[in-house]
Image (spheres, helix red, strand yellow):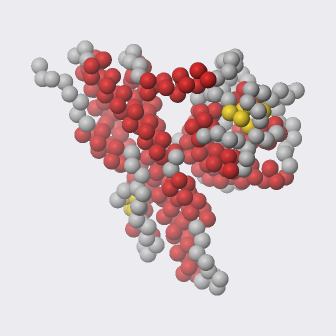
Amino acid sequence: MDELIYDDSLEVQLNSLICTLDKNPKLLINPVEASSYLSFTFASSEEGFQQQIELYYDSFMVYLNSFVKACIHANAKQTLLLPTLGRLLTNYKHADYVFTHSELRLDWKAKSQYFTIYNPTNDYIINKNEKYTRWAYDFFFKASSIQLNFINKLIADITILLESNGLVTESVHDDDARTNAKTPNIARRKNNFFTILPSASKHSHDILQYIHKCLKEGGYINCTLPEFKQVFMSTTPKPIIWMKDYVHLTYLIKKMLEHFLAESPFYSNYEIATKYFYKKSSGIYFKPGKFRHDKGPKKVDKLFIDSVIRNSINHFLGINE
């Protein structure tokens, strides 16, 4: 019998499109259709980019599932399957970290909305060039968001393959282990955590990255991006400190409930928020009389939070309000 080996050719093919940011995408405005990201042109659109990734992704997953079956048949789960899947999971988690911490992606997003060419005479050509430049940056950002989405699909798929075959690696459960080791003794009740709407899940990483950046700069929170994300994306979150008053927190949750957070069938999201946001000082929880949003914060804070939601959730989900 031939020795069982892992063929990485389809992995390499897929990774060439999803694991690396194009740090020098080609930006052209005459014509803008020639602008390109990883050699995919604006003319082919982000849909064309996604379709190509889907072809590579499907081929890789067909091979990976056949490799898993072959390892099981050859009794090589510990010797070959575990090291291979563990390496893949570690690599994709690293790629996720690189993408979600990329200042370049945030710059593309900002320029897709606010890029401006000084134009005191309101010259038509300059206005057109400004518009086309924004389109190009929007293409770069959307292409990178597609990459991130597939990276996270792979993390989920590989984790399932590991766990369904009784395989456990530190890289599978390291986040939950750190969370459980440090989380105070909070009762874990059914659905006592935030749930992101399926319609928003594709862009959840980008949305939370932008919200974290704004809230941190605005003095509402003081935590890292991973610490902030796990509050909304983990079933065992570790609480973070909320630097403002309770009305600011409930107003944020109210706005997130419109298009981002799902209503829990068991517990109010306002109650859930009191479990995972400390009141200014570590170890002190909000204890409102009722778990609800009674009133809005001051106008300046309301406008700030509205702006954060508009430029994150509404922007990524294409909602015009």
Indicate the quadrant where residue 82 lies.
top left
Q: Position of residue 81 (x, y in %)?
A: 30, 23
Taking the view exactly as shown, the residue that stands out farthest to the left is 1
Reply above or below: 40 against 84: below
Q: Position of residue 193 (x, y in %)?
A: 66, 26
Q: Position of residue 204 (x, y in %)?
A: 57, 41
In the picture, measured across the screen, residue 63 lies left or right of residue 95, that is: left
In the picture, measured across the screen, residue 46 lies left or right of residue 295, that is: left
Give the quarter of the figure containing the N terminus.
top left
Q: Position of residue 38 (x, y in %)?
A: 37, 56
For the question of whether residue 262 can be seen, the reply is no
Indicate the quadrant where residue 205 lies.
top right
In the picture, measured across the screen, residue 192 lies left or right of residue 280, that is: left
Q: Image point 68% across, 41% down: which residue?
A: 222
Q: Image point 46% across, 41% down: which residue?
A: 96
Q: Image point 82% across, 32% down: which residue?
A: 292
Foreground: 121 or 285? 285
Reply above or below: 14 against 7: below
